Structures are given as structure tokens and as C-alpha cells.
Image (tube, helix red, strand yellow):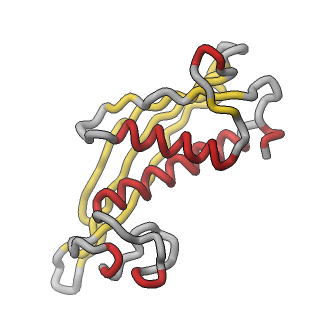
């Protein structure tokens, strides 16, 4: 897969995302999530901006949270937490954007307070509660992490298939 990246790009800088929302700590969460995806994939060396061949810049444009599913009694049973991020991947030697794109990710959560027994597939992996070993923690935070992971995976996939 790494063969699809321009050959002169062997490293990437991923500075802290700009945040145009009121959501505290989201810049750090998304930036860390993207860095983690790159470290796991090992396709480009992560470095600071002065030593990098490319820079991945991002801006958190919007956070949206609202009802997602309703019960038979028409009460909200599940909420959806969605994040929209604008990303630019810049080639330093060519002095141009390789791509610029919008990314979205979402996670779902209920009101029970325990995502391990809420009957919801919180991370959208087809597994619920006892059958899903990674569903635990505070519901809204978990939904945020799911959205961040989806965005980071999509960005990495696009970078690996750009050329």
C-alpha cells in the first residue's frame, strides 16, 4: 500500500488540529487518534514540521449531537455524536496540497450510563454488550472515541490510496 504514496514523501508532521467548536479536548483526541493510526500502519515516519516531507493539517468544523433512535413510546433511546473535520495533506517539496477533504465520524450511545449493558452497538462493529469486549466506559466519551477512530482510519486509507 505504501507504494501509492509519492516516493519523495517518507515522513509526515501532524500538528494539533484547529478546533472551531466549543468541544473541549477534541483537538487533542483527534490529533492523537490520527497519530496512533499512522504509528500502527507504519507507512510514514511521524516527525516535527521542520523535518517532515509532508504535513497533515486539520480543522474540526462541527460537532453535532442529537437523537438517533426512538423507542415504541417515541422516547429517545439512542443519541448520535458526530464530528466533521476538514483535512489538508501538504507536500512540502512540491509546495502544494496533495489533497483536501472533509471527514465525518460518529458514535452512538444510550442514556443508561453503562454502555456494556445498554443493548446498543455503540462502536458499530456488529457486536452488542457482552459480545463486544471493547464496549466500556462513559457513553458520550466512548461515542467520541468511536467517531475519532473512524475519521483517523478514513484519513489513513485516503493517504494510502492517493496516487
When the figure is inspected, residue 62 is found, relative to residue 95, above or below; the finding is below
What residue is shown at x 69% (from left), y 21% (from top)? 53
What residue is shown at x 60% (from left), y 14% (from top)? 50
- Measured as percent of width and height from the top left, residue 59 is found at 42, 31
Which quarter of the figure has residue 24? top left
- The answer to which of 123 and 63 lies nearer the viewer is 123
Which quarter of the figure has residue 3? top right
Which quarter of the figure has residue 81? bottom left
In the image: residue 95, left or right of residue 5: left
When the figure is inspected, residue 150 is found, relative to residue 17, above or below; the finding is below
- Measured as percent of width and height from the top left, residue 146 is found at 43, 58
- The answer to which of 102 and 92 lies nearer the viewer is 92
Give the total of numbered labels: 0
What residue is shown at x 49% (from left), y 45% (from top)? 33
When the figure is inspected, residue 6 is found, relative to residue 150, above or below; the finding is above
What residue is shown at x 44% (from left), y 53% (from top)? 105
- The answer to which of 159 and 26 lies nearer the viewer is 26
In the image: residue 160, left or right of residue 146: right
Amino acid at each position: 500500500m505504501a507504494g501509492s504514496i509519492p516516493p519523495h514523501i517518507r515522513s509526515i508532521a501532524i500538528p494539533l488540529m484547529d478546533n472551531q467548536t466549543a468541544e473541549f479536548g477534541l483537538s487533542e483526541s483527534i490529533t492523537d487518534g490520527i497519530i496512533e493510526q499512522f504509528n500502527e500502519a507504519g507507512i510514514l515516519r511521524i516527525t516535527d514540521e521542520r523535518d517532515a516531507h509532508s504535513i497533515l493539517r486539520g480543522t474540526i468544523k462541527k460537532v453535532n449531537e442529537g437523537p438517533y433512535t426512538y423507542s415504541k413510546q417515541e422516547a429517545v433511546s439512542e443519541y448520535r455524536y458526530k464530528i466533521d473535520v476538514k483535512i489538508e495533506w501538504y507536500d512540502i517539496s512540491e509546495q502544494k496540497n496533495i489533497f483536501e477533504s472533509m471527514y465525518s465520524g460518529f458514535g452512538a450511545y444510550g442514556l443508561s450510563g453503562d454502555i456494556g449493558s445498554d443493548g446498543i452497538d455503540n462502536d458499530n462493529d456488529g457486536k452488542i454488550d457482552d459480545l463486544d469486549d471493547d464496549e466500556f466506559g462513559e457513553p458520550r466519551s466512548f461515542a467520541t472515541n468511536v467517531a475519532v477512530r473512524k475519521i483517523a482510519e478514513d484519513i489513513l486509507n485516503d493517504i494510502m490510496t492517493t496516487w
